[in-house]
Amino acid sequence: MDMKLEVIIIPVSDVDRAKAFYEKLGFRLDIDYAANDDFRVLQFTPAGSEASIIFGKGITSAKRGPADSLVLAVDDIDVARDDLIARGVDVREVFHYVGGPFNNAVKNPRVAGRDPQGRSYYSFASFEDPDGNGWLLQEITSRLPGRIDAAATTFGSASDLASALRRAEAAHGEHEKRTGQRDANWPDWYAKYMVAEQAGTELPQ
C-alpha cells in the first residue's frame, strides 16, 4: 500500500504576511478558506511537488516553535538560489556539511561552497520565512537506488527537464570522447542516462 506525504503544517503568527511570502517564493496557492474569524486555512504547493504546506489560524491546538530544515529538492542549487534572490528572498550562500548531508554532530558542520565532489544530496542553501520557519534547498541530480519507482520517469517542470538534458549532453560528450566516434543513436543514450540518473541506477558509459 502506498503512503505518500501529502501535507506539512507550519506555524505562522501573521497569516497574510506568510501568504505574501509564499506567493513571492512562487508556491502555488491551492486553498485560502476562512470559515469565520477564528479559523482560516491556506495550502501552498511548491512547483513540481506532490506534497504541500498548510498554515493559517485555528489549525493546531497548541502553540509551536518554528519548523526547522524543511527541504526543497532542486536539480541546480545555484539556479534555484538565484531565482529566489530575484524574487526578493534572502537566501544564504551555498554550503555543504563536513560529515555528509544533515550532519550537525560535529563542530562547525557547515562549510561554505558546494560539495567539492559535486555529489547529489550534498549541496545546500538556506532561508527562512517571516516566522523563522527554516527551509533548505538541496541539490539532487540523481537518486539513491530504490528511492523512486525506476519504471516511472517524470520531471516537475520544463526547467527540471532542461537541466537533465544538459547533464545528459555533458555526459554524452565524455562518452563520445572515450569511444572516439560520433554516436548517431544519441537520443537513446540520452534517454537511458536520464532514466538511470533519476532512478539512481547505474549510468550508461
Image: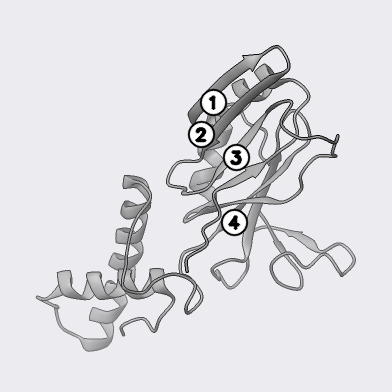
Relative to 196, does residue 60 appear above or below in the rendering? above
Residue corresponding to mark 2:
27
Quarter of the C terminus within the rendering = bottom left
The reply, left or right, for residue 67 in relation to residue 169 is right
Tag on residue 53?
3
Q: Give the number of the mark in front: 4 or 3.
A: 3
The reply, left or right, for residue 80 in relation to residue 176 is right
Give the alpha-carbon distance from disc 1 to disc 4, as whole Å: 20 Å
**Secondary structure of the residue carrying numbered label 2:** loop
Marks 3 and 2: in contact by CB < 8 Å? Answer: yes
**Which amino acid lies under the numbered mark 2 shown in the image of this protein?**
Phe
The reply, left or right, for residue 204 in relation to residue 34 is left
Residue corresponding to mark 4:
138
**Secondary structure of the residue carrying numbered label 4:** strand
Where residue 171 sits, quadrant-wise, is: bottom left
Where residue 103 sits, quadrant-wise, is: bottom right
**Which amino acid lies under the numbered mark 1 shown in the image of this protein?**
Glu
Marks 2 and 1: in contact by CB < 8 Å? Answer: yes
Q: Give the number of the mark in front: 1 or 4.
A: 1
Local crowd size for mark 1, using a 10 Å CA cut-off: few (<14), some (14–19), many (≥20): some
Q: Position of residue 155 (x, y in %)?
A: 35, 55
**Which amino acid lies under the numbered mark 3 shown in the image of this protein?**
Ile
Marks 4 and 2: in contact by CB < 8 Å? Answer: no
**Which amino acid lies under the numbered mark 4 shown in the image of this protein?**
Gln
Q: Position of residue 56 (x, y in %)?
A: 68, 26
Residue corresponding to mark 1:
23
Tag on residue 61?
none
